[in-house]
């Protein structure tokens, strides 16, 4: 079946540091890949997505590249801010039906001033 | 704001009691999803509706769980004879129907605590 593996958190960084959150997946076919973010007390929000190999999703300074050869979709940001503190979820949605996403466990990011 | 809303935000109940949660999706969205999220885990799919039709149910959805979307607008999720293992955050999301992936918009969730 489909699965997503994320690095365990929390990830603790100082403001302006470089961020990488690793995500690898297992899926049949060619899934679409996503990063969702959940700020404290709020619902999950789609941060970025990529629908085919070598696509790069980007939003709010975050980027992730769909790497089929390594089955990875690592999230990166060059300079994090305190306001980026949240839980980040990697997810995939396989084609051919309802596109119900499979989520990873989430990685908590804490950014200190 | 016309995002997805869920009520109540928090529910504390005693084991064996029934609880019902409500989800109001974004008005033009015809798909509605329910997920369960436990501490330290990502959301796990429970069921989804397209308009009023319940099209898919996860094996996580035991027979104590029932969901409805009677007029294709709001939805309710009922848990009968609650157990401590039902304690979790219950998330609702909505989207437009499409032949490809459409972004799901999530509500803030209902946190259930079963004592």
Image (spheres, coloured by chain):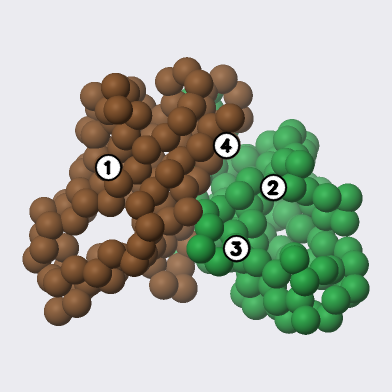
Chain colours: A brown, B green
Residue neighbourhood size for the residue with mark 1, other residues' Cα within 10 Å, grouped as few (<14), some (14–19), many (≥20): many
Counting from the top left corner in percent of width and height, residue A101 is at: 52, 39
The CA span between labels 1 and 2 is: 27 Å
The CA span between labels 1 and 4 is: 21 Å
Query: Chain under label 4?
Result: A
Residue carrying label 2? B46
Counting from the top left corner in percent of width and height, residue A66 is at: 29, 30
Query: Chain under label 3?
Result: B
Regarding residue B5, the answer to whether it shows in the image is no
User: In what element is the residue under mark 3?
Assistant: loop
Query: Chain under label 1?
Result: A
Q: Do the residues bearing badges 2 and 3 touch, measured as CB atoms within 8 Å?
A: no
Q: Earlier in the sequence, mark 2 or mark 3?
A: 3
Residue carrying label 4? A100
Q: Residue at x 76, y 41 (%)?
A: B59
Left or right position of A46 against B54: left
The mark lying in front, picked from 1 and 2, is: 1
Residue carrying label 3? B38
Q: Are marks 1 and 2 on the same chain?
A: no
Res B10 → quadrant? bottom right
Q: Residue at x 63, y 46 (%)?
A: B45
Counting from the top left corner in percent of width and height, residue A40 is at: 41, 72
Residue carrying label 1? A74
Q: Residue at x 57, y 47 (%)?
A: B94
Where residue B9 is drawn, which disc sits there?
none
């Amino acid at each position: 079946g489909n699965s997503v593996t994320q690095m365990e958190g929390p990830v603790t960084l100082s403001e302006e540091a470089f961020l990488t959150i690793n995500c690898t997946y297992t899926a049949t076919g060619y899934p679409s890949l996503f990063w969702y973010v959940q700020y404290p007390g709020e619902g999950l929000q789609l941060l970025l997505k990529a629908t085919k190999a070598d696509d790069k999703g980007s939003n709010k300074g975050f980027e992730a590249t769909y790497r089929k050869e390594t089955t990875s979709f690592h999230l990166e940001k060059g300079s994090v801010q305190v306001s980026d503190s949240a839980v980040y979820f990697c997810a995939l949605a396989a084609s051919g039906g309802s596109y119900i996403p499979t989520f990873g466990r989430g990685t908590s990011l804490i950014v200190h001033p | 704001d016309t995002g997805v809303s869920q009520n109540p935000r928090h529910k504390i109940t005693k084991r064996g009691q029934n609880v019902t949660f409500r989800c109001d999706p974004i008005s033009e969205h015809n798909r509605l999803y329910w997920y369960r999220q436990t501490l330290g885990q990502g959301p796990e799919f429970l069921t989804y509706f397209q308009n009023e039709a319940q099209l898919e149910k996860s094996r996580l959805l035991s027979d104590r769980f029932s969901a409805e979307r009677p007029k294709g607008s709001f939805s309710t999720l009922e848990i009968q004879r609650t157990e401590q293992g039902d304690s979790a955050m219950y998330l609702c999301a909505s989207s437009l129907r499409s032949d490809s992936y459409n972004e799901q918009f999530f509500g803030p969730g209902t946190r259930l605590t079963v004592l």
